[in-house]
Image: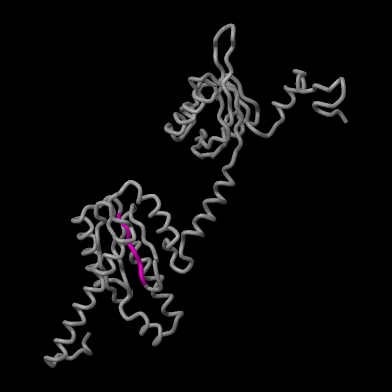
C-alpha cells in the first residue's frame, strides 16, 4: 500500500503526480470547480455537474455563478471575504438547479493569482448539505411548535424577541384566551378540552394573515403577533377576530391587544395586551352583575 506524504529521507509525494491528482478530482464525491472572479465557469469535475444538475461541462459553462445562486446578497458577502482574506471556508450558499430544485452547499475556495499574467482564478469545492439542512429544519420545527395545536410555542416567541429587540421593529400583539376553560375541562374532560384548543388554533390560523404568527403561550392562551403593523391596523384585526369569533369560534373567547411602543420590550407589549384582555373581562363581568341585579336572567347567556 502506497502512503501519501511518507516518512524518511525519500517521502512519497504522490499528490504531486498529475495522474494522481486527476484521478482524485474525477472520482472524489464532492464538487470541484475553477471559475473566474467574475463568476465565469472554467472547469468542473463530474461530481459538481451531478450536484448542479447539468449533463455536460459545456452546458454548465453557459451559466454564471450568479445565475446559479439563489441569494445574490450571500454571493456578494462571499466575494467580500475572498477579497479581504484570499480564501473562504464553509460558506453556505443555496444553488438552484435547472429543474427548479434548490440544493444547499458549503463552499470552500481560494484565490490564485498568476504572477506572470496577473490573471486570477478561484479554486473551490462544494459539499452538498441539503439533507442535513432538511433534518435541521424538521428538528427546528419540533422545537418551536406546540405538539398539540401545531401553533408556535414560547421557544419561538423567545427567538422572535431576540430578533426584534435590537432594532425596535414595530409589532402588534393580540392575546386570546378561552372563556371559563377550566369549567369546560371539568365538565367535559381534558380530551374534549384538548380538542377545543386544536379547533381554536385552526380558527386563529385560518383568520390570520400569511405574515402573522399564532403562538400558544399557555394552557388556553394564544398570542397573535403582527409585525410592522400600526395601531390602527392592529385594532382593526383585533376587531375582525372578535366578529369572526362571535360567528364561528368553537368556544367563547376574549381578547386584548397592544402595539409595541418606542423602546418597549416585546414581553412588555404582550403584557399590555394581556392587561387589555383582563379589563375587557372585568367590564363584561360588571355588565353581567348589573343585569343580574336588575332581574335579567343569566341563563340566556
Q: Is residue 68 above or below residue 196?
A: above
| Image coords of residue 199 (percent x, y) | 38, 71
Residue 68 at x, y percent in the picture: 49, 30
Vertical placement of 219 versus 123: above or below?
below
Residue at left offset 56%, top offset 37%: 105
- Say whether residue 299 is left or right of residue 71: left
Looking at the rendered image, the quarter that the N terminus falls into is: top right
Q: Is residue 1 visible?
A: yes
User: Which quadrant holds the C terminus?
Assistant: bottom left
Q: Residue furthest left?
A: 294
Q: Nearer the viewer, residue 116 or 9?
A: 9
Is residue 222 covered in magenta? yes
Query: Which quadrant of the figure has residue 189?
Result: bottom left
Q: Is residue 98 above or below residue 142?
A: above
- Please tell me which residue lies in front, 70 or 90: 90
Q: What residue range appears in magenta?
A: 221-226
Residue at the (27%, 57%) spot, across then down: 172
Is 134 contained in the magenta span? no
Q: State left or right for residue 36 relative to residue 211.
A: right
Q: Give percent across and percent down for residue 295.
A: 13, 93
Q: Is residue 53 visible?
A: no
Q: Main secondary structure of the magenta part?
A: strand
Q: Position of residue 261 (x, y in %)?
A: 24, 55
> In the rendered view, how is the structure colored?
one colour
Q: Is residue 169 left or right of residue 129?
A: left
Residue 234 appears in which quarter of the rendering? Answer: bottom left
Amino acid at each position: 500500500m502506497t502512503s501519501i506524504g511518507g516518512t524518511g529521507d525519500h517521502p512519497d509525494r504522490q499528490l504531486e503526480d498529475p495522474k494522481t491528482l486527476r484521478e482524485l478530482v474525477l472520482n472524489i464525491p464532492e464538487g470541484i470547480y475553477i471559475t473566474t472572479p467574475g463568476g465565469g465557469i472554467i472547469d468542473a469535475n463530474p461530481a459538481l455537474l451531478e450536484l448542479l444538475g447539468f449533463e455536460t461541462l459545456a452546458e454548465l459553462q453557459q451559466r454564471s455563478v450568479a445565475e446559479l445562486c439563489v441569494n445574490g446578497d450571500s454571493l456578494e458577502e462571499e466575494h467580500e471575504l475572498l477579497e479581504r482574506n484570499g480564501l473562504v471556508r464553509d460558506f453556505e450558499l443555496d444553488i438552484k438547479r435547472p429543474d427548479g430544485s434548490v440544493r444547499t452547499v458549503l463552499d470552500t475556495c481560494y484565490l490564485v493569482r498568476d504572477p506572470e499574467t496577473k490573471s486570477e482564478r478561484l479554486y473551490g469545492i462544494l459539499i452538498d448539505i441539503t439533507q442535513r439542512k432538511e433534518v435541521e429544519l424538521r428538528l427546528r420545527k419540533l422545537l418551536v411548535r406546540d405538539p398539540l395545536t401545531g401553533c408556535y410555542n414560547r421557544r419561538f416567541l423567545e427567538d422572535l424577541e431576540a430578533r426584534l429587540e435590537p432594532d425596535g421593529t414595530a409589532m402588534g400583539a393580540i392575546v386570546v384566551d378561552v372563556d371559563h376553560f377550566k369549567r369546560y375541562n371539568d365538565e367535559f374532560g381534558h380530551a374534549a378540552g384538548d380538542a377545543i384548543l386544536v379547533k381554536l388554533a385552526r380558527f386563529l390560523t385560518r383568520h390570520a394573515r400569511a405574515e402573522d404568527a399564532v403562538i400558544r403561550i399557555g394552557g388556553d392562551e394564544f398570542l397573535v403577533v403582527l409585525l410592522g403593523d400600526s395601531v390602527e391596523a392592529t385594532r382593526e384585526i383585533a376587531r375582525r377576530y372578535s366578529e369572526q369569533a362571535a360567528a364561528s369560534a368553537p368556544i367563547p373567547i376574549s381578547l386584548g391587544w397592544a402595539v409595541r411602543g418606542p423602546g418597549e420590550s416585546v414581553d412588555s407589549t404582550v403584557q399590555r395586551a394581556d392587561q387589555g384582555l383582563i379589563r375587557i373581562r372585568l367590564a363584561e363581568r360588571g355588565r353581567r352583575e348589573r343585569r343580574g341585579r336588575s332581574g335579567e336572567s343569566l341563563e340566556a347567556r
